[in-house]
Structure formats: C-alpha cells, structure tokens
Amino acid sequence: MKKLLVAISLIIIIISGCSMTADNNKDMEAAKQESTSVEKNTSKIDSVEDSLLSPDRILNIAHRGASGHAPEHTIASYALANEMNGDYLEIDLQMTEDGELIAMHDSEVDRTTGGEGAVAELTSEDIDLLDAGEWFNEEHPDLAEPVFSEAKVPTLREIFETFGKESNYYIETKIPEESPGMVEELADVLEEYGMLDDDMEEGQIIIQSFSEASLREMHELEPSLPLIQLISYDKKADITGEELDNINEYAIGIGANYKHISKEYVQKVRDAGLLVHPYTVNEKEDMERLIDWGVTGMFTNYPDRLNDVLDDMDSE
Ligand code: G3P
Ligand code: CA
C-alpha cells in the first residue's frame, strides 16, 4: 500500500509539472548562476534576490505540507504544497525506538493516526502499520478525499525518495533532548540522499529547532547548513543584543510565533542581519501585516493563500 501511495503521489507530482514549478526552477537556476558566496551562520547573507536565503525574498514555508488542505505530514500534503508553489516543505521529526526519523509533530501518534503511544516506544514497523489521514477526513468532511484514508506516516527517507533534490526542505528536530542521536541520524540521512552535495542549491535544506543545543550540534557536524533558531514567546516579544549576537554565532535567522512579535521586533532581528520567519500564519491580513513589517518568510498551512497575497502585492 505504501508503494501504491508513493506511486499515486509521484503521478500527482508529474501531472502538476513536477514538484517545482517552471518559475521556481527558473529562480533556482538563476540563483545558481548569480549567487556568489553566502557566508552561512553569520550575519552576512548575500542580497542576491533569487537566492533562497536572500533577505530580499519572502519564503513560503508550507507548514507540515499544505496542511490546511490535506492531512499534515503526509506525502499527499507535501505533494499539494509543491503543487501550490510553496518554497519549502516543512517537516517535524520524531525518532522511533529503532532510530528511524519519521515526519510527525507530536511525540505520540494518537492525534494524527489510528494508533496510540509514544513514537519513541514504537518501531518503524509499528509506525508503518498506522493510517495517517483518516482523522483528517473525519474532522474535515468538507476537505475529505478517499486518497487521504490511504495516507501513511512517512519516514524522512521516504520523503527524500519521493521528492528528491528538486524540492526544498525546512526540517525541525523536535524535542531532540529526548531523542539522543537524532541530530547525527539527520546528518547521516541528509548525506545518504545527497542533500549535502555540491549540486544542491544554497538553502535547499534548512534545519530549525527550539533547541539551541541541537542547532549547535548540527553546526559542529555540518557547518555549511543554514539553521533557524525557533523561539516561542508567551507575551510581547523582545530580544536583546546579546541574544541576537549569540544566535548569530550558529544560525541565519529566527522563527517566532507571529502573534507576539511587533514591527520593532522584526526590525531589530533584521538589523542584526538575521532572517525572520514567523509561524504559523494562516490569515491573509496577518500575512500582509507581517510582510509590511519586513519578515523574510513565514510558515503557513495555506501556501496558496500566501502566494495570492504575494501576487496581489506584486501587482500593486
Ligand atoms: O517550526 C515552526 C513551527 O512549526 C513551530 O511550531 O509546533 O508547529 O512545530 P510547531
Ligand atoms: Ca515545526
């Protein structure tokens, strides 16, 4: 069944013009030709407009795929995100008992599958038996699709096998302190699938985490990988110069919950030479306001909606 679902997804991708649009391919080709060096993990990010990491771009990060339209973290959700021209597939990682990296937000399988229990106490074989889309069809009858009932929990390997080097990945190590070895395993899988090779565009892989320790560990292992420090604020966001200097030692930007940030916050982070990617922005008026404040991208469950906003702004 897994093979069937992957085959269906591949057909969707091919029909929709592969996982990147002609425009995105053109952007990436232009970036390859025009981009000079991006000094990663410092504040000196080039301003080459087409470069994925350019502060002049507004990145459309498809949060858990196009998860406003399809069950989160499934091949169907990622395929739809690519169809909708999201710039990145956002993937949360959990690690199984036998050390396989899988795409799942929660540390337990209960909310998004028919199973129950902690990922860390289940093997990859156990996970492979679970359905990952039935809940979505039940909760969203208006969006339900028979194919979602067939959805499985993908491993990171299956995602790379399906979408290859033509997609861009924004990968989060989830609670890595509870999954020893997660960062090394991620680096190994990236290497295994050629995601660290020279033929990859600068910025095609971004690693994000709330855990500074895990980002610093990744920075040690793979200094060239761009990293984003996630921060969760529970009141009006502020950040000190010292904190910005610290983040600038290993990361190229900050991902913060959008409801607590302000124009001043965005400016402060940008002035420190860091990118700002708020999460998770689903309403057009919030998207417009944040773009106006100077963010350099955002996480959204609706990559189509963000592209509408960007198109409208372009045509003004
Ligand atoms: O990774 C950015 C954002 O997704 C963080 O929140 O809980 O959706 O992973 P969460
Ligand atoms: Ca995430």
Image: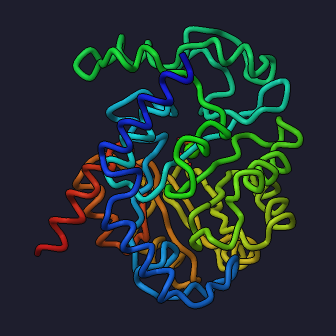
Image: 155 above or below 54: above
Q: Residue at x 66, y 68 (%)?
A: 226
Instruction: Judge left or right: residue 30 versus residue 146.
Output: right
Q: Quadrant of ligand 1?
A: top right
Instruction: Judge left or right: residue 1 versus residue 199.
Output: left
Image: 301 above or below 144: below
Quadrant in the picture for residue 162: top right
Q: Residue at x 62, y 88 (%)?
A: 37
Instruction: Judge left or right: residue 250 versus residue 66.
Output: right
Image: 308 above or below 280: below
Residue 255: x and y in percent read 55, 59
Work out which residue is located at the far left of the displayed protein and give it: 316
Q: Residue at x 20, y 57 (%)?
A: 308
Image: 127 above or below 157: above
Quadrant where the N terminus is found in the figure: top right
Front residue of 24 and 66? 24
